[in-house]
Image (tube, grey):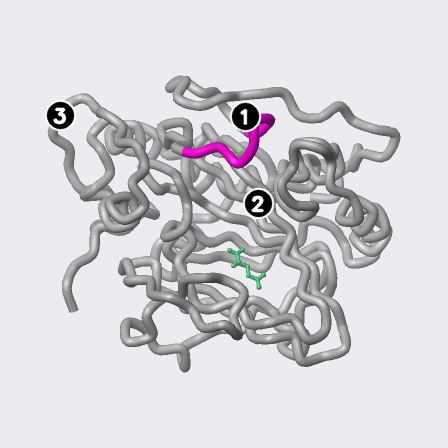
Amino acid sequence: MGSFYPCLVPRQRKEFPSVAWPDRTYEALDHPLSGDVLNCIPPGPALYLRASYQRGVAVESPGQNRLSTAEIESFKSDGFLGPYPMMSPAEMADLTPEIEAVLATTPSGHQKSWHNRHLDCRLIFDLASSPAIVDRMASLYGPDLLLWRTSFFVKDPGAKRIPWHQDFNYWPLEPPVIVSAWIAIDPATVENSCLQILPGSHRKVIPHIKAGEEMIFDEMGDDRYYDPDRAVNLEMAPGEFILFNERTLHHSHPNQSDRRRIALAVRVILPFVSVLKWDSPDHLLHLLAGSDRMGFNRMGDPPVAGDRAIADEKELA
Ligand SMILES: O=C(O)CCC(=O)C(=O)O
């Protein structure tokens, strides 16, 4: 099988504007990013990653949610981690009517009711910025983290299949370095199409081809390049979440049960990643941790807390 370079393949095809970086040499690092990907990250960001990693972020990352060395190694080898609890199933059940109310509205300027609702709803921002998520991401990727996107995945009974894919194939980010959290709002079981993941698949870049009509996405990972029999079911209770990176192959079957399955996906980037295309005029990034020393992207303040934010979430995490 040939070698595929992630920051070249999708960008050539989708014609995003290019980003210039200082002309410096860099070397491979022992980092959650695999060698292939690191070798095509521009020198500036690669040096930044090395600085973060050599400082020992695994040891210095804040909070009680800090990952152990074994967990960091597991993420490096498998491309995902978890599930971890963010809150109890009962606490998530209490929030679910509010989440349903959010999904029932589409504010002006937003494209879809299920996309980027952290921009206008404090509840969604609070879920996305939970210390349970942010501390663990900081253990893996260093102290500076920016919230890029959130998306709900609502799979009602009968919902179609989401094909096997690597997220970075679709996204206008340069370089494509993203860590996602996938939070179960409803119970996610084999019956109602829980997420499935292929451990270790983040080490390769898979070509993506046109997907069939029976799928929710237009493009899918070419199945000549992976073995779906190695898939792991990620069944989760409400309030649990997993972390995975931009190349970890994942998908979900059609929902053949009579039970809805809602999840919230949270997309986080590092300050050296440039957003090449914004989702809407009001789309801004939010600082989740550390600082933005690069200044590449439009940054904003989180939405103002309403009368029902997850105020005590630190205690729940
Ligand atoms: O929830 C699903 O079924 C798919 C989620 C997904 O593709 C993602 O979070 O990137």
So how many labels did they put on this image? Answer: 3
Q: Earlier in the sequence, mark 2 or mark 3?
A: 3
Image quadrant in which the C terminus is located: top right
Residue at 56% over, 27% down: 281
x and y percent of residue 222 in the render? 32, 70
Image quadrant in which the N terminus is located: bottom left
The answer to whether 202 appears left or right of 312 in the picture is left
- Count residues near mark 1 (Cα–Cα under 10 Å), then give few for <14, some for 14-19, many for 20+: many
Dot 2 lies on which element? strand
Residue at 37% over, 41% down: 177
**Residue at mark 1 to residue at mark 3: CA–CA distance:** 28 Å
Q: Nearer the viewer, residue 221 or 277?
A: 277
Question: Can you identify the residue that label 3 sits on?
Answer: 24
Quadrant housing residue 18:
top left
Dot 3 lies on which element? loop
Q: Which mark is residue 266?
A: 2
Question: Can you identify the residue that label 1 sits on?
Answer: 287
x and y percent of residue 201 in the render? 34, 64
Magenta span of residues: 277-288
- Count residues near mark 2 (Cα–Cα under 10 Å), then give few for <14, some for 14-19, many for 20+: many
